[in-house]
Image (cartoon, rainbow, N blue to C red):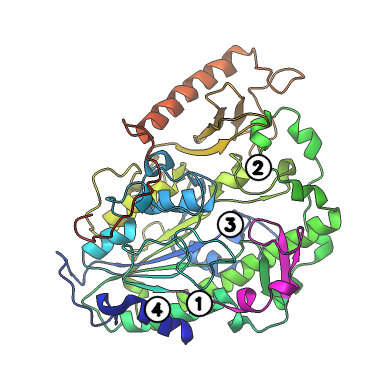
Amino acid sequence: MAALLTAVGHVGANASDPVTTETSATTTSADRPNVLFLISDDLNCRIGCYGDPNVQTPNLDRLAARGVRFENAYCQFPLCGPSRNSMLCGLYPDSTGILANSQIFRETIPQHQSLPHAFRLDGYFAARIGKLYHYNVPRSVGTNGHDDPASWEMEINPMGCDRSLEESEIFSLRKGSFGGTLSWYASPRSEEMHTDAMLAEEADWVLERCAKRADRPFFLAVGFYRPHTPYVAPKKYFESYDLDNMPIVDDVEEDRVDLPPASLLSHKADHDLLTDQLRREAIQAYYASITFMDAQVGKVLDSLEKHGLADNTVIVFTSDHGYHLGAKGLWQKMSLFEESARVPLIIATPEGTSRGETATSPVGLIDLYPTLAELCDVKPPANLQGQSLRPMIDDVDEPGRGFTISQVTRKLPKQKSRFFGYTIRTPQYRLTLWDDGKNGVELYNHQTDPTEKNNLAFDGDQTDSMTRDADTLATIQKLSNMLRKEIARGIPEDGRPAVKTRKWVIDLTNP
């Protein structure tokens, strides 16, 4: 229970006990639902309820059966820090100013209320266990990482054997490098010794106490570290996957011929060290980490039931971005292809509306803030840029906004200045513009090409060759106009906020 003692010590006079804390908030109605916000790290959509036949996720599958599964959900920036700040602020990365890791929005827009901050101000007990904002994984495991102190009344930061004992035993493509390098380990140690299992245990501790305060709703966020590298999980989870049957990609060269160079710049030199055997081992370890994380999700869901809280709790499960496992020769994140930008998203409400159904219209993580605020009758800031998904939860055929956008930064070899890539995803198409098209254009028809093999914008034997097909050009023009309009909506009139070097002070009620 060392992690709990650390948490209480950190909270201090502000809220030493979540069940007795006084609040001056405007609303304390016991009728409002609780929120259990579960997020995985670096998880793509290769899970059972998203149709993957290989990956075992029985607990996410049962959550999907009681909630709405969003088939086409996307992050706004496929990198941990920018994505998480965007999601928790309800703003595009261009509005948060966070375009890299190891930063938080208090350095750019310190006056903004985050999602949990708004819930705190409206009477909710807000607690975090594990990773919600950016952490240097694995180095920051067991600390607050790059967290926002105004967002939470309590923070709990366990550190398991995967961080404290096992790093010398982990295989890595670059010896001694783990967080940004493909690395993995089948641990012989017991499950309860691992960080993610400790997160689930701590969640049970918090939920037990929240159950004693029926007059005060809670916002509990649990941020699991797996399957982020290093892919460390108990050995039994590795053994549930046959190494020889791991699905490695074998059409890389054919799949890259019509791609602009900017689209492939997330490739790392380390990945050139992969052999087919190592590819299989990496995929096996990634799958094992997913199933291990899924088991911990199951423990938290069971705890919610055990403490009688399930009937009045909104449950969200998602990931900060997707993840490549070899498609187009890419691994990990930071591309604008489907594998990297797409995330799982499941929302289950106490009413059980649209139970077990699937919403297919594109949505973004930016939409979670206004959605939860509406579901819980919490007053959000007026400048949120996402849409509420409440209509789609009530009726999965509702189209909502009908599109979502994502972005990354790029710098070509020998080029001094960076440029942006933006992509828009509609029900039928994905259009990507690199430097507003000056460094490449991609167009994919997801109705006929769901794995994005055929770039319709390409025509010829050079990667910068543009199609001459009139209908395709008209589609590109139409989608480009939509994308540019949404980009403009996300950039403040005075430009993207810059990280400020001056000191800032947290003021919960008047930032």
Seen at 71% across and 23% down, the residue is 463
Judge from the rendering whether residue 127 lies leftward or rightward of residue 421; answer left or right: left
Residue 308, position in %: x, y?
35, 80
Q: Are marks 4 and 2 in contact (CB under 8 Å)?
A: no
| For residue 187, above or below residue 69 | below
Q: Which residues are magenta?
A: 157-186
Q: What kind of residue is marked 2?
A: Ser
Residue wearing tag 2: 266
Q: SS class of the residue under badge 1? A: loop
| For residue 173, above or below residue 409 | below
Mark 2 or mark 1, which has the lower sequence index?
1
Q: Nearer the viewer, mark 2 or mark 3?
A: 2
Q: What kind of residue is marked 1?
A: Pro
Mark 3 or mark 1, which has the lower sequence index?
3
Q: Nearer the viewer, residue 344 or 221?
A: 221
Residue 303, position in %: x, y?
44, 80
Q: What kind of residue is marked 4?
A: Ala
Q: Which mark is residue 42?
A: 3
Q: Are marks 3 and 1 in contact (CB under 8 Å)?
A: no
For marks 2 and 3, give the CA distance: 15 Å
In the image as oriented, which residue stretches furthest toward the front? 502
Residue wearing tag 4: 7
Q: Residues within 10 Å of mark 2 (few under 14, many from 20)?
A: some
